[in-house]
Image (cartoon, rainbow, N blue to C red):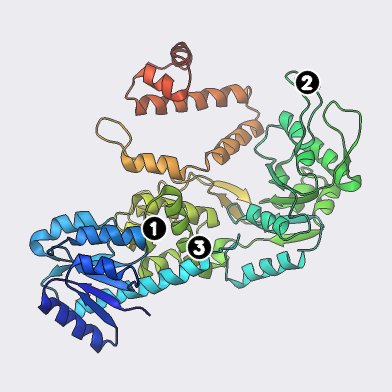
Amino acid sequence: MKPIWIVDDDQSIRWVLEKALARESLLSRSFTNVRDVLAALEDDEPQVLISDIRMPGGSGLDLLQALKARHPGLPVIVMTAYSDLDSAVAAFQGGAFEYLAKPFDVDKAVELIRRALQESLREEEMEDRLVDAPEILGQAPAMQDVFRAIGRLSQSNVTVLITGESGTGKELVAQALHKHSPRANGPFIALNTAAIPKDLLESELFGHERGAFTGAQTMRRGRFEQAEGGTLFLDEIGDMPFDLQTRLLRVLSDGNFYRVGGHNPLRANVRVIAATHQNLETRVKEGLFREDLFHRLNVIRLRLPPLRERPEDITLLARHFLQKSAKELGVEPKRMSDEALAYVSTLPFPGNVRQLENLCNWLTVMAPAQTIEVKDLPREMIGGGSGSNGTGTASGIARAPEARDDTDGHDAVDYGAAPSVITTEPDGALSFAGRVASAGAMAGWENLLAGEARAMLESGQPEVMDALTRRFEKAVLEAALGVTRGRRVEAATRLGIGRNTITRKLQELGFD
């Protein structure tokens, strides 16, 4: 373990901390100014650094900025006099591990340094794990069974059916099966069969010839052709229309298919991996899924456990997602305290790994300090909000749950939405936090759109495409006008449309 660096121009402070750390058998190294610390960083680095804020020849602020540029994961504790407290808290919350107000209790100072030390060692361990992070993370016995199954299937081309609740990572398993298969050098093509309208799904799968239908001005290769020599992943296979199931069965049976409007058979050299959150046996009994297709797909079945069956993985996944979210948003990675991790590990997470990832995205944007405590979690997650529903879901973390039947016959909940907590300024413009949340954490809106379309189609609502298009256009225009504070010309420019177009759209959509 590396030593703890103490930076203070006050000799008495350095002496007290050195003796206190020595009693705890902790190595330390002292500096009187920022210049010497920066020089020492060329050849060495500390495990934890504790620094005064006001020193001759350079401030603790400058030192913190330099340290975060070189060693972003290094915990820095700031010492400050009470007269500097407000400015220190405001300045260091974005980067310092914690602050220590002078005069301080020595025992409390040592306790704080030990906390920072534990966090530093934990971060080093996580960095080692994330250097070459596997495509799927999990230490629970249930996930180890999945890993063993992937290993056994590594040299096989057999069809695999992946089952599990929404948000458990079925596509990640499909990608791992492809990556470790003989077809790894070929393409991996994924298609969510529930997200494509019925009249377009056949063309998506098999392609179409020129002139096959209105608008088919050129020949188009379908997903089977795109996946030639590789793997085709068919997600939500349980929602595939019944008549298309027959065509899929034909391909799986003899390997031949026709483009829409085509007359010449094409040969498919493709491995098919299917996934569903539904109980296909029940769908077969209800006459909604072909029994012969089910048996064709159900050669090897992999069941992904829900997160509530692998709570020991929550800590590992949370740290991974906090690192990932910070990297995507270009900000300093945040960390959960031991208490917060322990609390989060007790939550049910009906949205599974996806919901946990969404929570980490939310915390990266909304948590006020670098160290996340239990109080920083969304109110409903800690039972403090009036909107708490007792399920552990958080306001702004997930959309209203859509009950479904999972593969074991229990209710599953789809938490496909990313965090959508967006605050506004007094004039109605989006705040900085809102803009970051919108840009960095709304990756799941396509799933929401697909779910809404599916619900409308299943209910028999007419003119679904037109209704959804109007709602989409209205939402985009409202967002653009919000950003530009109602200035239409600027909104049109930002959207990449003409002034006449935005005027016409606003009239058509009934804007005031």
Q: Is residue 14 left or right of residue 436?
A: left
Q: On the rendered image, what quadrant is the C terminus found in? A: top left
| N-terminal-most mark, 1 or 2 | 2
- Cα gap from disc 1 to disc 3, whole angstroms: 14 Å
The residue that label 2 is drawn on is 213
Residue 469, quarter of picture: top right
Mark 1 and mark 2: span between their CA atoms?
51 Å
Label 1, on which residue? 333
Pinpoint residue 31: horizontal percent, then vertical percent.
20, 73
* Residue at point 43%, 63% (across, down): 344
Q: Residues within 10 Å of mark 1 (few under 14, many from 20)?
A: many
Can you see residue 404? yes
Q: Which mark is residue 489?
A: none
Count neighbours of disc 2 (C-alpha within 10 A) and say few if under 14, some if 14 to 19, many if 20 or more: few
Amino acid tagged 2: Phe
Could you tell me residue 414's position as x and y percent?
56, 48
* Residue at image coords 46%, 27%: 476
Measured Cα–Cα span from mark 3 to mark 2? 47 Å
Is any part of residue 78 visible from this angle?
Answer: no
In the picture shown, does residue 474 fall above or below 406? Answer: above
Could you tell me if the residues under marks 3 and 2 are in contact, i.e. CB atoms within 8 Å?
no
Camera-side mark, 1 or 3: 1
Could you tell me which secondary element the residue under label 3 belongs to? helix
Say which amino acid is labelled 1: Pro
Question: Which residue position holds label 3?
Answer: 317
